Image (tube, grey):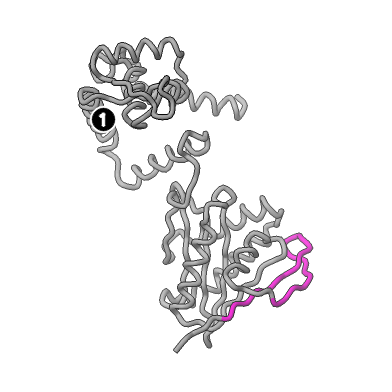
Amino acid sequence: MTNESQLIANIRQFNRFYTMQLGLLQQHIFDSEFSLTEVRVLYEINFNQQTTATGIREALNIDAGYLSRLLRNFEKKGLVIKHPLPEDGRSNYLQLTARGKKIMTTFNELSDGQISRMLEDLDPEQRCKIAHAMSTVRHLLKAPGSALSLADVHIRHGLQPGDVGEIISLHGRLYAAEYNYDLRFEQYVTQTLHEFLPTYDPVKDRVWLASCFGELVGMIAIIHKGRGRAQLRWFLIKPECRGIGLGRALMKEAMDFCRQQRFREVYLLTTNQQQTAAGIYLKAGFVKTGSEPVHLWGQDLYEERYELKLATGN
């Protein structure tokens, strides 16, 4: 099989497993009088509060005639009621009646219990893996409401076992993909971390790691250098997490820490290729103080230095 054929086969195999696991092939859901499609329509009405028939049809890709028959049947059973739209009296929005809400509450409780039983033999780490995998699938396939936001990102500080390897790996893969840096760049990152770890002081040094769906997607670090000076290092954001404010959030964490530690000066070394990061440095108050041509990691570059003077107060 080709890679695409294998991927399609894997997805279909998972779909077969999951539909069987949840009993979605049964004629009626949870041994009720309702089919899967009917429950999905009731869910849309309940979830969206004031949705219309058009909104349901677009969300579920249901034939208009079939949906119309379902809605008429729901009205006859006293599950759904129509209200004229204030802006257009010829159209209606749909809401569940008290009976309809009671039925959906029961379905939600049964569904929650079904999922809980599926997960009951899994440890917390395994449960997290499932949650992250499902969020990743929804995001990659552009499901409604799955666009990344800063709320999807968890930022923590303090190095833990395994972090250093992930930091090196992320730097190596990202810079190779974006700037065609060779293995010598990964060696350079490894060396800088090797030099840093023996002197790592969690009180004076701080490394922030940002993760999304269980995967490292960004980081920044402040390393104390003595005499009121510190260096900003290893600042990067994965492309898919750019534009959501993560860079600004990490920079704020770093600058707040510098002021808390009363550092008088913070500096960083970068290259002319990191223009997006340079914009964040400048907005934070850094000033470019040096630029010189170098040949590094298989590329002709300009190594640049940025500095920030901080007011220490009394």
Range of the magenta residues? 289-309
* Location of mark 1 (residue): 108
**Pick the front one: 297 or 46:** 46
Task: Identify the residue at image location x=38%, y=39%.
Answer: 130
**Pick the front one: 239 or 177:** 239
Task: Identify the residue at image location x=27%, y=29%.
Answer: 111
Task: Identify the residue at image location x=29%, y=15%.
Answer: 74
**Pick the front one: 75 or 7:** 75
Count of marks placed on residues: 1
Image coordinates for residue 276, horizontal then vertical, percent: 64, 59
Q: Quarter holding the N terminus?
A: top right
Identify whether 13 is placed above or below 268. above
Q: Which of the 4 quarters of the picture holds residue 86?
A: top left
Q: Secondary structure at mark 1?
A: helix
Image coordinates for residue 8, horizontal then vertical, percent: 54, 25
**Pick the front one: 230 or 77:** 77
Q: Quarter holding the C terminus?
A: bottom left
What secondary structure is the magenta-colored segment mainly? strand
Image coordinates for residue 82, horizontal then vertical, percent: 32, 21
Image coordinates for residue 229, horizontal then vertical, percent: 55, 82
Q: Residues within 10 Å of mark 1 (few under 14, many from 20)?
A: few
Identify whether 135 is placed above or below 108. below
Q: Is residue 294 magenta?
A: yes
Q: Is residue 122 magenta?
A: no
Identified by mark 1, the residue type is: Asn
Identify whether 286 is placed above or below 128. below
